[in-house]
Image (tube, rainbow, N blue to C red):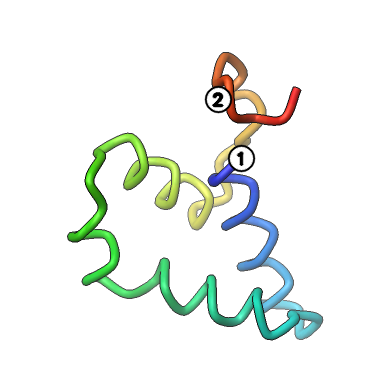
Amino acid sequence: MLCSMVQNSAQRVSNGSASSTDKILEGLVTSEWIVNILPSAALQEALTAGLKNVDCVKKYKTCSLNGK
């Protein structure tokens, strides 16, 4: 869920169709300080995966928060 949300926002920012929320989210997750204050390495990994265009559905197919 987090991976896909970050990925979608970053893509919309990149192609110029981002909403204000997309721009805020992309700005936060690309800031080093936000990654450093996250309480979980798993959250950090999901953010990074989303930014690197990893196949989020495949990577996190067993995640209970993926909306399936």
Q: Earlier in the sequence, mark 1 or mark 2?
A: 1
> Considering the numbered disc 2 on the image, is that residue within a helix, a strand or a loop?
loop
Residue drawn at point x = 73 percent, y = 72 percent: 12
- Label 1–label 2 contact, CB within 8 A: yes
- Specify the amino acid type for callout 2: Tyr
In front of the other: 46 or 54:
46
Q: Position of residue 34 (x, y in %)?
A: 28, 67
Q: Is residue 33 left or right of residue 1?
A: left
Picture quadrant of residue 15: bottom right
> Considering the numbered disc 1 on the image, is that residue within a helix, a strand or a loop?
loop
Residue drawn at point x = 66 percent, y = 66 percent: 9
Picture quadrant of residue 67: top right
Q: Residues within 10 Å of mark 2 (few under 14, many from 20)?
A: some
Q: Is residue 19 left or right of residue 34?
A: right
Which residue is the site of mark 2?
Answer: 60
Q: How many marks?
A: 2
Residue 1 is labelled as 1
Q: Residues within 10 Å of mark 1 (few under 14, many from 20)?
A: some
Compared to residue 25, the image places residue 60 above or below, namely above
Q: Is residue 57 left or right of residue 33?
A: right
